[in-house]
Image (tube, coloured by chain):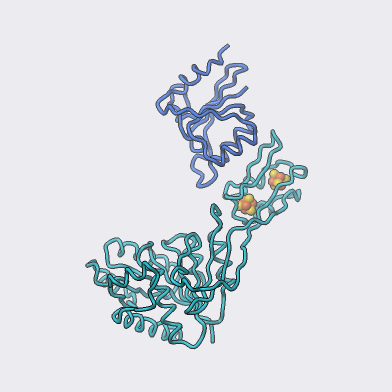
Chain colours: A cyan, B blue
Amino acid sequence: MSSFKIAIASGKGGVGKTTISVLLYHQLQKTMNETISLVDCDVEEPNSRIFFPASTQTNKEVAYQEIPMIDTTLCSFCRKCVNVCEFNAIMMVSALEHAEVNESLCHSCGACEYVCDRQALGTKRVAIGEMSQHNTSTGVLYEGRLEIGSVMQTRLIGMLKEWGATDHLTIYDAPPGTSCSVVETLDEMDYVILVAEETSFGLHDLKLIVRLVKALQLPFGVLINKAGLGTTPLKAYLEQEHIELLGEVPHNLEFAKASAQADIFSNIPWSIQTSLERVTQKIKHKRVEL
Amino acid sequence: MKVVITSTSDSLTSTFDRRFGRTAWFCILDTEDDAIRFIPNEHLNASNGAGLKAAEMMGELKVSKVISGDFGPKAKQLLDKLGIQMVVIDEADSLVQEIIERLNYTK
Ligand code: SF4
Ligand code: SF4
């Protein structure tokens, strides 16, 4: 089997992106004879695992970043490193022979080390988060959890994607919005599913994420969640822009409640089930086509 | 000794700026000779680390005391390390001049 990477994204949180990711993961696993992985890339607030209360952790690894350290006995206080640091992470007071790198501002870009001609910069390792692997009732789940206060979300997402790489079908649950973390998640995807809601805010948010995936030149389609709830011309927009509508997951109050209690696989309503089947069918075709 | 007051503009009749890292100007009072200088905050619009850069500047200028309304946690830490005293006042409408007068450094 070859790998096939699908990201599930939305212009904003609260449209049921994680629920959809988990349902598609479940549905795809049922119909395919390979182990499907789900990678929760929302490292600031990972929540896919809530849907699998019986999952067991099978592996974990701490992710590190390298932070430069300035040896003031070698440093000439020339400030080259200070000026090259785009993140204002280096503080230097030559009058007091004080030099330090602020961990929460440093992005480990290496620029300071590159410009220093006195070898005054060493490095130390600082944890930016943890990556863990779980066996769920469905398949494998990977989760990244950012260390509180760390600004290295994109780095952690990149590491998590590498750590959880398989040659099977993998679903990546992107963080909500259109931030750098989303861009990092979408990098090297084979296909992107955008989850949208039929409300006026929903349309606005969808347009933002459509702009992003178009800029990244990724093939994508839209899945309407909680269909039938609103009346905005979302479909008219899709038609006008020639965007593929992958399917509509109907709104179902009882089911929404169940998914809030994270007991969603036990009785998926038939209307939702049929729509999921249609979408997974389309995904399988995409895999052959792309 | 040098005392700094964060200021919204570059004259004694400017109002006090409550923000340390994102103040527009620094008013520097040298108590030795009563000289007063204003220097702009070049890191005012930095997306990150404005407070730290301001604290660094205080160190370079060999300031002993900074008067402002709100020091961020990072700036506070660095100022502490550099041995610079922080004075917090909460008087958004005061003029820089009034604060200087209250300091009572004049010989
Ligand atoms: S590694 Fe990059 S971000 Fe970190 S201190 Fe050096 S120049 Fe700044
Ligand atoms: S570039 Fe090197 S020598 Fe110059 S201030 Fe930075 S650490 Fe010191």
Does A188 appear above or below B18? below
Closer to us: A107 or A239: A107
Does B8 appear above or below A155? above
Residue furthest out toward the top: B107
Closer to us: A40 or A157: A40
* Left or right for A6, reference B76: left
Give the x, y percent position of residue A98: 69, 39
Give the x, y percent position of residue A2: 54, 84
Give the x, y percent position of residue A271: 28, 80
Closer to us: A85 or B76: B76
**Residue A109 position by quadrant:** bottom right
* Left or right for A206, reference A111: left
Give the x, y percent position of residue A77: 71, 41
Number of marks present in the image shown: 0
Residue located 64% across and 47% down the image: A101
Residue located 27% across and 64% down the image: A199
Residue furthest out toward the front: A54
Residue located 52% across and 68% down the image: A143
Figure quadrant of the N terminus of chain A: bottom right
**Residue A31 position by quadrant:** bottom left
Residue furthest out toward the left: A231
* Left or right for A118, reference A224: right
**Residue A158 position by quadrant:** bottom right
